[in-house]
Image (cartoon, rainbow, N blue to C red):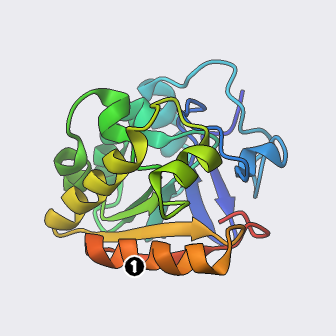
Amino acid sequence: MADIIYTLEGGVYFNITNKCPCACSFCIRKKGDAVGSAKRLWHDAEPTFAQIRAAVDSFDFSAVDKAVFCGYGEPTAAYDNLISTAKYLKKVNPRIKLRLNTNGLSDLINKKETAKEICSVIDIISVSLNAPTAEKYDNITKNKFSGAAFGALIKFTKDCVACGNEVYMTVVDVIPQDEIELSREICRSCGAKFRLRSFARGR
C-alpha cells in the first residue's frame, strides 16, 4: 500500500490520489516511486476517505502547524476526499494551516466552480502556472483539456483571491528567464503572490 501521509524537509504532505489530467515534462513523480519519508507514493487503488482518515488518526498532528495536499497526483482530482480530509484535519487540530498545491484545473476536472468551497477549508492555495501563454502551457503540461486549461487556471486563481485566501502562482525554473518574468506579471494581474520553484528540489 502506498503512503498517504509523508514528510519532506520538515513538512507534512498528503498523497490522496494519483490521478492528474496533466503529464508535465518536469513532474516530480517522473523522478522515482517516492520522495521524502515515503517508501512508495503510487497507489494500487485510489484511497478511500476511510483509509485517509485512518492515516490521519495514526499520525501525530498535535504539534503540526501546517500540512500540504501535494502527492503523486492532482489533489482536486479526488475532490470529495480533499474537502472531507481538510475538514477532518481542522477538527483534529484546529490550529493547523492547510495548503493546496494544485494545477488550478479543478473546475474543469469536476465540471463545476470549486474555488469557494476549497477556500472555505484550505488556507493557502498554490497554483502551478508553469508558462505565460496558453500555447506554452499546453506544450509543457500536455493536459487533457485542449486549449481550455490556461484560461481555467487563471479564473480559478482569481476566484481564490476573491475569497480572501493567501494565493500563490508558481513556475518551475526550467523555463527561460523572459517567460519567468512574463509569468510574474500574469500572477500580479491575478492578485496572487509569485513563487519560483526549483526543479532540483522538487518543490
Total tally of numbered discs in the picture:
1
Residue visible at 43% across and 68% down in the picture: 169
In the rendered image, the quadrant that contains the C terminus is bottom right
- 1 left or right of 51? right
The residue lying toward the viewer, choosing from 10 and 179, is: 179
The residue under label 1 is which amino acid type? Glu
- 170 left or right of 198? left
In the rendered image, the quadrant that contains the N terminus is top right
Q: In this view, does 65 lie above or below 101?
A: below
Q: How crowded is mark 1: few (under 14 residues within 10 Å), some or many (20 or more)?
A: some
Element at label 1:
helix
Residue visible at 62% across and 18% down in the picture: 45
The residue lying toward the viewer, choosing from 69 and 186, is: 186
Q: Quadrant of residue 85?
A: top left
Image coordinates of residue 88 in percent, x first then y, are 32, 44
Is residue 203 among what the camera can see? yes
Is residue 64 among what the camera can see? no
Q: In this view, does 139 lie above or below 203?
A: above
Image coordinates of residue 103 in percent, x first then y, are 47, 49
- On the image, numbered disc 1 is attached to which residue? 185
